[in-house]
Image (tube, rainbow, N blue to C red):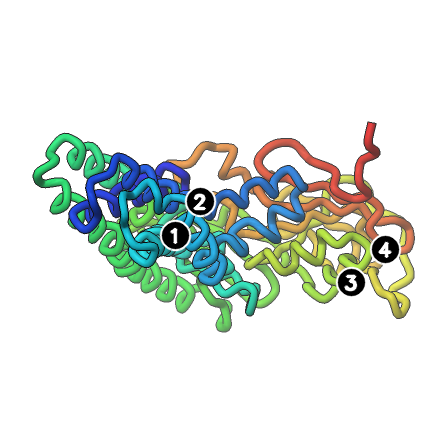
Amino acid sequence: MDPVTHVASGILIGQAVRGRFPRSRWLIVFAALCAWIPDIDNLVTYLGPEAYMRHHRGLTHSILGGAAMAALLAAVFRPLLKETSFARVFVLAFGCILMHDFLDVITTYGTQIFLPFSDARIGFPAVFIVDPLYTGVMLVAVVLGFAMKTRAKAVAALALAWLFLYPAASLGLREIVVAGQEKRLAAEGPPHAVAHVTTDGLSPFFWKVVVDDGESYRVRGASLWDPAGGPDIAVRAKADREKLRRLGRDASILATYDWFAEFLAVSVAAGPPAATIPPAPGADGGLISAAQAGQAASPGDPSPSASASPRTLIFSDMRFLGTSPALPEAWRNPNRPSFSVRVELDGSGRPEKVYYYRGGGPVRVFPAAPTP
């Protein structure tokens, strides 16, 4: 979730437990800081896109890492909380950090809460990454808590209940769209297609649907009043993960991207296809033929012949393509999905250049740009 939501949750926790601590002006500040602190890992942005994908929502968002941060924060802030025991301060800090983890887990980005034992990215599609209704109710409760000091605890308790009830209700409403998609797939086919319903701008009213038909991903929007959804806004071939991992032997960000992406798709970038490349890779691999990589499946994309291999591939994760009319048009552009990589192959089918896209223009990540 966004920083405002995290900080608001910490303030609400501080207001709810204020009566259990000696009076201190630092209590609310401490709770808000603890509720935000896991996002300190955003600093890895300065280490590049691969580090961001690998480490954001990583160790600082894990249960074990959160306990370590809570112990450190409790040791630092305990003198300011007027003779409160270390254990009580630790419990408050750890509770705020776990609330942060919960708010991140209910989004689709994925959170590595079991590090260092597992790097699995856990996510339940209940709330969109920015939800004005969810956060707005929290902010109103924060203001009321400061304005109505005698009732701050009750207001905060109700707001904390909202933090759990809203995602639960959202998941319940999601089932309406799930049923609509199952009915549509039963009528349209193909027989083994599966519809994954995930959050989008202004969920639970709008939802994104990613249909896996075995060979491609089809993305469309749906809503509570139109559970079957509209036409597909994008169709992309499913990427061969093993081939991507082979490319990742030369450019590690591609192996990281394979680990990061949930609905991994591939398309061929515009431009003339390369001359025919030998169809069999060597033992150290790296070759992706056009047939294996999948030609672009959406209208208007180039479709080179199966006998030619593409020179430029675009890998994308279809969960980051927006469909909701509440989102800016740039977020709904199927030709510019966020968190995508563009791979230019050399004559032997190995990565020559790799570019990363995250909303803005391309950033070259392989080979590393020379330092001025």
Q: Name the quadrant of the C terminus.
A: top right
* Nearer-N-terminus badge (2/3): 2
Q: Nearer the viewer, mark 1 or mark 3?
A: 1
Q: Which corner quadrant of the image does residue 214 belong to? A: bottom right
Q: Which mark is residue 349?
A: 4
Q: Which residue is mark 1?
A: 97
Q: Nearer the viewer, mark 4 or mark 3?
A: 3
> Mark 4 and mark 1 in contact (Cβ < 8 Å)?
no
Q: Which residue is mark 2?
A: 37
Disc 1: CA contacts within 10 A as few (<14), some (14-19) or many (>=20): many
> Mark 3 and mark 4 in contact (Cβ < 8 Å)?
no
Please provide percent x and percent y for residue 21.
21, 48
> What secondary structure is found at the residue carrying circle 3?
helix
Q: Nearer the viewer, mark 1 or mark 4?
A: 1
Q: State the separation of the CA atoms marked 1 and 4.
A: 45 Å
> What secondary structure is found at the residue carrying circle 4?
loop
Foreground of the two, 313 or 18 = 18
> What secondary structure is found at the residue carrying circle 2?
helix
Disc 2: CA contacts within 10 A as few (<14), some (14-19) or many (>=20): many
Q: Name the quadrant of the N terminus.
A: top left
Q: State the separation of the CA atoms marked 4 and 3.
A: 11 Å
Hey, what amino acid is under mark 1? Ile
Please provide percent x and percent y for residue 287.
83, 60
Q: Which residue is mark 3?
A: 246
Q: In the visual, does 347 lie left or right of 41? A: right
Q: In the visual, does 67 lie left or right of 282? A: left
List the single residue furthest toward the top: 372
* Nearer-N-terminus badge (1/3): 1
